[in-house]
Image (cartoon, rainbow, N blue to C red):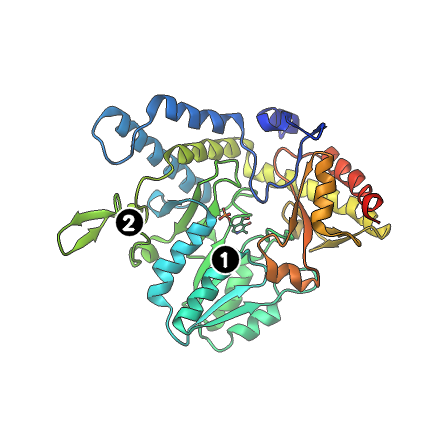
Amino acid sequence: MFDVEKIRADFPILKRKINGHELVYLDSGATSQKPESVLRAMDDFYRNNNANIHRGVYDLSVESTKMVDEVREKVAKFIGGRAEEIIFTRNASESLNLVMYSWGKKNIKEGDVILVTRLEHHSNFVPWQVLCKEKGASFRVVEVDSEGRIDGSSLKRLTEDGKVKLFALTGASNAIGTLVDIKKMVELVKKNNPRVVVVLDASQMVPHMSMDVNKLPVDFVAFSGHKMLGPTGTGVLWGKKEVLLNMEPFMYGGDMISEVGLTETTWADLPNKFEAGTPDIAGIIGLGAAVDYLTNLGMGEVRTHEKELVEYALEKFKLLEDEDLVTVYGVKKSEERGGAIAFNVKGVHSHDVAQVLNNFGICVRSGQHCAAPLVTSFNVMSMVRATFYVYNTKSEIDYLVEKIKEVPKVFI
Ligand SMILES: Cc1ncc(COP(=O)(O)O)c(C=O)c1O
């Protein structure tokens, strides 16, 4: 049974007061809060096991190495991959940059096309834009419809000439919550570009729903550990083994080598080839505890909970729209939406809205959500965004809606 009150008790920060009010944290899309078990796992590691990995034959180092290996297995199982295909990074941005540097620089040539969508977070947009400029390749952006779904006709038009070498798409929009039909989009691209390499930004998927990389027509999957109850400084790149094997390292140095000579060096096997230097060992251990926590909850249950919340929020926000108080962006059906709701209060800048809500203890994000091409396509400069996670409740949504009604009283 999904017991939100029990879950909330696991998150020490939720006891905090902000401006005299109970904390209502609605910014898990940016980073999630961390349960006691994650905090404890990291603390225990530093107190009882701390040593560098892969470097020592003494017990502590062997233990640390084993702990990191176990987390790799756990993460692999969580998304359906193999441990050797899991590369630990600092965040999703680093995972995507790894693909850009290691795969992109070698394989993208003048005249090729990289296809992205307007739904992308800057981290799955800018690296490809930069690579295209450097290589003389074309950067094409698939449009979205008025509700923020990927526009199939734009996608067909941009892929007809068969020049698309890489397709980078998100599984869920961080800004407006659209859930993407990944299989359908990739199939459409593959029709005329059968050898296209697909990079999936799953930063807003892996924390929120069950996922099996084997069932998706993708070559790479990037996500952050810190958005899935894990610590900051952790991210993951999954890549298909056969693709990873043909890639050059991302960074050079310790741990990623096999043999070093005075003139030549050979690389370590997967995944170490892509993990130069000392990783965030305690962070990875914390990430392992986060995976355990989510696994115990059940990812199906997590999705159901968030879907119920977003459905409830859409209903409540519809009433605010009927009162002509707010504009809500994005798809209207909860089946097509992750746990995010983006809106503006009419006549008030998003930062001002967030500031007033903060006075009541509510944390929401305001601005362009690292998705400027998407946000501005709605003819606005910014939006307010509330994102939900396992510890959020319907009564928090009621409180949010109640306090949104206060905003115009301050500014208008
Ligand atoms: C969809 C999406 N992609 C990429 C990122 C970048 O994640 P990170 O900040 O962990 O690099 C985010 C973060 O908000 C995101 O929501």
Q: Which residue is mark 1?
A: 124
Q: CA distance from mark 1 to mark 2?
A: 23 Å
Looking at this view, is 149 or 57 the one in front?
Answer: 57
Q: Looking at the picture, does residue 327 appear above or below residue 353?
A: below
Q: Which residue is mark 2?
A: 273
Q: Amino acid at mark 1?
A: Asn
Q: Is mark 2 within 8 Å of ligand 1?
A: no
Q: Amino acid at mark 2?
A: Lys
Residue at figure coordinates x 48%, y 39% from the top left: 232
Q: Residue furthest front?
A: 411
Q: Looking at the picture, does residue 306 appear above or below residue 188?
A: above
Residue 184 in the image: state x and y as whole percent.
Answer: 55, 61
In the rendered image, is residue 412 in sight?
Answer: yes
Whether tag 1 and tag 2 are in contact, CB under 8 A, the answer is: no
Q: Residue furthest right?
A: 323
Q: Is residue 259 left or right of residue 392?
A: left
